[in-house]
Image (tube, helix red, strand yellow):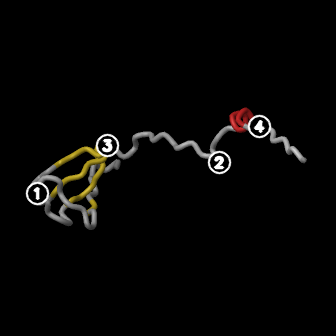
């Protein structure tokens, strides 16, 4: 925001953690940090939305080398 103006947006259905008022929370960005603020009681909190999350390991994102090491041959025994 080069002009110094902060744009605040309401969060529909959000409840203030301090005063429990619904639809009174706004979110905004200042100095590359995200904040939420209650317009009723003045509650202000920094939100940490960009924290890196560890992706769950699945068969789709497992490296081929790991899959190959876990693969076992099956022998069919006929009688």
Image coordinates of residue 51 in percent, x first then y, are 40, 40
* Nearer the observer, 46 or 75: 75
Distance, label 3 to label 4, CA atoms, is: 49 Å
Specify which label sits upstream in the sequence, 3 or 4: 3
Report which quarter residue 76 is drawn in.
top right
* Res. 33 mark: 3
Crowding at label 1, few (<14), some or many (≥20) Cα neighbours within 10 Å?
few
Specify which label sits upstream in the sequence, 4 or 2: 2
* Res. 62 mark: none
Specify which label sits upstream in the sequence, 1 or 4: 1
| Residue found 70% across the figure and 38% down from its top | 67
* Residue at which label 2 appears: 60
Crowding at label 4, few (<14), some or many (≥20) Cα neighbours within 10 Å?
few
* Residue at which label 4 appears: 72
Left/right placement of residue 24 relative to residue 30 reads left
Image coordinates of residue 46 in percent, x first then y, are 25, 44
* Nearer the observer, 46 or 8: 46
Is the residue under label 2 in contact with that under label 4 (CB below 8 Å)? no
Left/right placement of residue 57 relative to residue 79 reads left
* Residue at which label 1 appears: 19
Specify which label sits upstream in the sequence, 1 or 3: 1
Is the residue under label 1 in contact with that under label 2 (CB below 8 Å)? no
Image coordinates of residue 23 in percent, x first then y, are 20, 66
């Amino acid at each position: 925001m080069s002009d110094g103006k902060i744009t605040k947006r309401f969060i529909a259905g959000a409840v203030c953690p301090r005063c429990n008022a619904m639809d009174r929370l706004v979110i905004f960005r200042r100095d590359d940090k995200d904040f939420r603020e209650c317009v009723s009681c003045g509650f202000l909190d920094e939100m940490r939305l960009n924290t890196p999350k560890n992706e769950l390991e699945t068969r789709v994102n497992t490296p081929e080398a790991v899959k190959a090491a876990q693969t076992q041959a099956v022998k069919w025994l006929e009688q």
